[in-house]
């Protein structure tokens, strides 16, 4: 039912990069089932930065992981660049799961940065950044290397190309992870608490790279607790609590004049 | 290095027990060596003579072929079994479980005897449609010779053990690694080959080296097939023929020791290869020439290397040391 409503809306060409409609996610079955997302609607304009705030357990990360199909959604409809993620509905109205090959292609257009970096530990920074372009896109090693060096230079790590992740600080690792995601020329970048695992003094270098990226026109969804980043960089701020979006809008409105008591309470705690 | 204050020159705690125990063990070791060298019953001249005997050296060759051949087949099978067990197909999972249960649960000797008797149990083999027409028919005795029976018997048994080692290795890799690869658009097969397996090797190689060394000695059981060309049978045959069993046993033991030593060297290099990027940056050729100094990260690499080399810290890839 919800799927048919969403299908009638034509998305994509109007400048919407991400459109989420009535998204539900339930983990587990029966008595152990946990309803984590309870009907989320979200629009992200092309070239905009959306920051998702919320207490832990509010479903922020799950929302992000659903957009990238790292989690299978329970109900609803997610479109990125007008293309429905993970599913298709045939002429008779029957919903089909997309083939893993197609899902992999969809994911390859979306960059993801994780809280714990997840750099490939057995590869140098350069090899980490070259891996997906060579293995997924079939780029020549030479071309991938040139591009990887460029990207590592862009995140300020030109002198760290031959270092293994274990030889880099957390902030450096996260910047390599950003370069690795950018190497696939994504249309959309997802950041899942990118600075939460970092020492306080290393947070700034990662946020600076993200700010540069936003200025270059990248569409970004950022789950974070960095209110300062939200205020300075975000075009749109979303506050989630208990699986739903409680309040959203321009950063100045949401952060300085919160309407919802739950958001007021949250901001009082983090500011 | 900047100037240090006056160094702590503390006297160590006296530990006389260390000296006493070391002396006792040294004396015992000297007695053992003496007992070996001076006892004429070992006939060291005969040992030296047969160490280079043509039949013995040929036996060494066959033992090596059996060891490496069966390990190679077993590794491929084991990866297959481990992936089957970790997958979500219940048929694959059960079949892999049953295979491991069966081949670990029966003695290798029994299995080798069985493989030797296969041409009696199934005198002919055929290729064709299952339960349907046959296209090619072979005489089992022609296809599965004593050598192949021995090789298959060892390999199929070993695969069951290695499968569990591979499974443990695959489980040891942080699931975040596969997730990051998936997020980049890599497909399952590629994620396994490029991301998970290379890192699992760090855990897989040491016990597999152990298994290889164990296999070297297990090849002496292929007399059960019977296959009679490998080292143990070759030397004991000479021993019986010349009425000198003890020197020939020593010949075999020395060869096994030599091969084991070479295997250990090989294992060392394999471990170093698959340990690259881990072990606090001590390993891997690239790390060696990577610049340690640079703006913002002054001396980080050498610092981490020094801390890692001391061996007093926990090996944690997420260890945060702020420069």
Image (tube, rainbow, N blue to C red):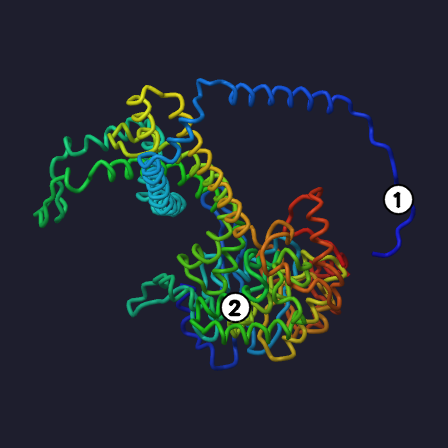
Nearest the viewer among A160 and B196 is A160
Q: Chain of mark 1?
A: B
Q: Residue at x 19, y 30 (%)?
A: B117
Residue receiving disc 2: A130
Would you say residue B94 is visible in this rendering?
no
Subunit bearing disc 2 = A
Judged by depth in the image, the label closer to the viewer, 2 or 1, is 1
State the image coordinates of residue A124 (x, y, percent, origin top left).
58, 62
Q: Quadrant of residue A268?
A: bottom right
**SS for tag 2?**
helix
- Compared across the picture, whether B22 is left or right of A33 comes to right
Q: Which residue is mark 1?
A: B7
Residue at left 73%, top 59%? Answer: B300
How many C-alpha atoms fall within 10 Å of the one at disc 1: few (<14), some, or many (≥20)?
few
Q: Rate crowding at label 2 as few (under 14), some (14 to 19) or many (20 or more) other CA atoms within 10 Å.
A: many
The residue furthest bottom is A14
Depth check, front residue: A61 or A154: A154
Q: Are marks 2 and 1 in contact (CB under 8 Å)?
A: no
Q: Position of residue B289 (x, y in %)?
A: 64, 62
Image quadrant where residue A223 sits: bottom right
Q: Quadrant of the C terminus of chain A?
A: bottom right
Of residue A11 and residue B275, the one placed in the foreground of this image is: B275
Same subunit, labels 2 and 1: the answer reads no
Residue lying at the far right of the rendered structure: B6
Q: Quadrant of the N terminus of chain A?
A: bottom left
* Tag 1 secondary structure: loop
- Gap in angstroms between the C-alphas marked 2 and 1: 48 Å
Name the disc covering residue A27, or none: none
């Amino acid at each position: 039912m919800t799927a048919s409503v969403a299908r009638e809306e034509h998305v994509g060409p109007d400048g919407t990069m991400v459109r989420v409609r009535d998204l539900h996610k339930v983990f587990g079955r029966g008595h152990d089932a946990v309803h984590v997302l309870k009907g989320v609607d979200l629009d992200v304009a092309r070239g905009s930065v959306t920051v998702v705030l919320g207490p832990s357990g509010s479903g922020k990360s799950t929302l992000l992981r659903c957009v990238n199909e790292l989690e299978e959604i329970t109900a609803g409809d997610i479109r990125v660049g007008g293309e429905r993620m993970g599913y298709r509905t045939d002429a008779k109205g029957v919903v089909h799961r997309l083939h893993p090959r197609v899902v992999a292609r969809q994911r390859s257009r979306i960059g993801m940065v994780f809280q714990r970096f997840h750099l490939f530990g057995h590869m140098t920074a350069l090899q980490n950044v070259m891996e997906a372009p060579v293995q997924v896109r079939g780029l020549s090693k030479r071309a991938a290397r040139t591009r990887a060096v460029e990207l590592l230079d862009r995140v300020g790590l030109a002198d760290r190309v031959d270092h293994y992740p274990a030889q880099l600080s957390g902030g450096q690792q996260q910047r390599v992870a950003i370069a690795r995601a950018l190497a696939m020329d994504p249309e959309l970048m997802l950041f899942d608490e990118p600075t939460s695992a970092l020492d306080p003094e290393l947070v700034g270098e990662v946020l600076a790279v993200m700010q540069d990226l936003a200025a270059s026109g990248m569409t970004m969804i950022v789950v974070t607790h960095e209110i300062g980043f939200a205020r300075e960089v975000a075009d749109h701020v979303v506050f989630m609590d208990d699986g739903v979006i409680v309040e959203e809008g321009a950063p100045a409105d949401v952060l300085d004049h919160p309407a919802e008591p739950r958001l007021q309470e949250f901001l009082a705690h983090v500011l | 290095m900047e100037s240090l204050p006056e160094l702590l020159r503390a006297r160590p705690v006296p530990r006389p027990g260390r000296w006493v125990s070391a002396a006792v063990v040294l004396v015992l070791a000297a007695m053992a060596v003496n007992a070996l060298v001076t006892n004429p019953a070992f006939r060291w001249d005969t040992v030296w003579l047969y160490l280079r005997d043509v039949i013995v050296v040929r036996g060494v060759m066959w033992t090596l072929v059996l060891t490496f051949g069966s390990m190679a087949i077993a590794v491929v099978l084991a990866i297959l079994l481990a992936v089957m067990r970790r997958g979500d197909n219940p048929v694959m999972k059960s079949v892999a479980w049953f295979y491991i249960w069966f081949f670990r649960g029966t003695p290798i000797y029994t299995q080798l005897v069985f493989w030797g008797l296969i041409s009696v149990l199934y005198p002919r083999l055929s290729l064709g449609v299952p339960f349907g027409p046959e296209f090619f028919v072979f005489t089992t005795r022609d296809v599965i010779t004593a050598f192949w029976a021995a090789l298959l018997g060892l390999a199929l048994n070993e695969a069951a053990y290695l499968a569990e080692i591979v499974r443990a290795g695959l489980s040891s890799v942080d699931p975040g690694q596969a997730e990051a690869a998936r997020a980049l658009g890599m497909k399952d097969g590629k994620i396994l080959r490029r991301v998970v397996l290379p890192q699992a090797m760090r855990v897989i190689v040491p016990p597999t080296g152990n298994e290889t060394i164990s296999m070297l000695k297990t090849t002496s059981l292929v007399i059960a097939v019977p296959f009679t060309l490998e080292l143990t049978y070759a030397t004991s045959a000479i021993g019986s023929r010349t009425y000198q069993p003890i020197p020939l046993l020593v010949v075999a033991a020395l060869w096994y020791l030599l091969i084991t030593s070479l295997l250990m060297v090989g294992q060392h290099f394999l471990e170093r290869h698959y340990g690259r990027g881990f072990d606090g940056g001590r390993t891997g050729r690239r790390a060696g020439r990577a610049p340690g100094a640079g703006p913002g990260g002054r001396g980080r690499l050498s610092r981490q290397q020094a801390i890692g080399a001391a061996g007093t810290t926990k090996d944690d890839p997420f260890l945060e040391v702020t420069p």
